[in-house]
Image: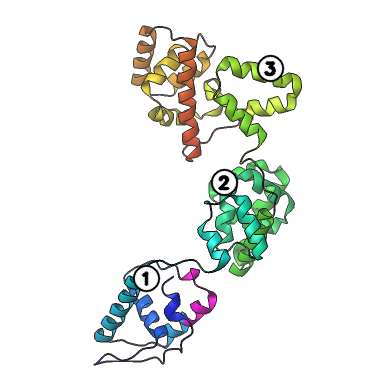
Amino acid sequence: MILSSPLSGLPAASGPQVSGAPVQLSRRAKAAVVVRLLLNEGADIPLEDLPEELQAHLTKAMGQMRTVDRDTLSAVVSEFAEEVERIGLRFPGGIAGALNALDGKISPQTAARLRKEAGVRQTGDPWARIREIGAEKLLPVLQSESIEVCAVVMSKLEVKKAAGLLGMLAGPRARQITYAVSLTGSVTPDAVERIGLSLAMQLNAQPLGAFASGPVERVGAILNSSTSVTRDDMLEGLDETDQGFANAVRKAIFTFANIPQRIAPRDIPRVLREVDPADLLVAMAGAEAAGMKASADFILENMSGRMADALREETQEAPAPKPVDHDAATANMVAAIRKLEAEGELILMAEEED
């Protein structure tokens, strides 16, 4: 931050109460003037990114200031603007800052190796990183940590993710954590930060996998994009090799046939807004021949009556689509549904919840 330079290594301001001609202020006092002016204008200044020592210096400098006349304020602002204009490029300080700046740009393996070699931990808000971690990686934490720690974790997560994790836990433990959340009112910010740092370090210390998702999800994604003939053949082969894995893959797969079991009736209009009408017509026209009449009926029952009547009429008049065209249309519809799910606009229900 630009303000870190005026705040460092200089004597504290003497707390001038000035009027008349501009007076000479220390750089620390000038920084206090600039920060106060920006805050008055409603600017959101990320002062928390400054080292704690500089935050303390700034606070003390502001506490010693009283009033500053317009001439002095104008001179300080002009000097600050000139310093900003002279800066061409600013680099993060140290290997920790460089790694944070390159986060997501270099491979996780390289970042972990460099961090270990330099002996630095990842900086910044640990809870921001924890919130980005998938539910499947957070679940073991909630199963192994103390109830009190789990209550803090649930309180720091987004409501939707916390609710999903709660549903994955065993009933007794989920109830214990839920009750413990009601007791977190007295937890101090320092304790919350220590818990976040400890969990972030624990999660970062886990071995890096070669793939971003598990084998079930990868196979499910591949079969989702396959034709129905290929998908059925592969699942039949998996049944012979590993029935448990095959059943897990079936749960991960979402196809046009799964719409009645996996999508809430209220979400059908939202889905249809994202689907190409041409794909919808082909999918509906070939649904009965493909053994997916239940999905077509479910869609018709949960859209407006006028639209349903028009779609039925178009479906009856349309020629029977070829199987390959029907597969392509239903695949496009599934892709639209998956997109809504990824964006958090739609939650697919588990098969068991039907």
The magenta span reads: 47-57
Residue 287 appears in view: no
Residue in the picture at 35% in, 77% down: 34
Mark nearest the camera among 1 and 3 is 1
Q: Under tag 3, what secondary structure?
A: helix
Is the residue under label 3 in contact with that under label 1 (CB below 8 Å)? Answer: no
Magenta span has 51?
Answer: yes
Q: Position of residue 341 (x, y in %)?
A: 50, 36
Marker disc for residue 236: 3
Residue in the picture at 50% in, 17% down: 327
Mark 2 sits on what residue?
161
Kind of residue indicated by mark 2: Lys
Mark 1 sits on what residue?
87
Q: Is 142 on the left-hand or right-hand side of 230?
A: right
Residue in the picture at 49% in, 72% down: 50
| Label 1 or label 3, whichever comes before in sequence order | 1
Q: Under tag 1, what secondary structure?
A: loop
| Label 2 or label 1, whichever comes before in sequence order | 1
Along the line of sight, the residue nearer the viewer: 24 or 187: 24
Mark 2 → mark 3, Cα distance in angstroms: 34 Å
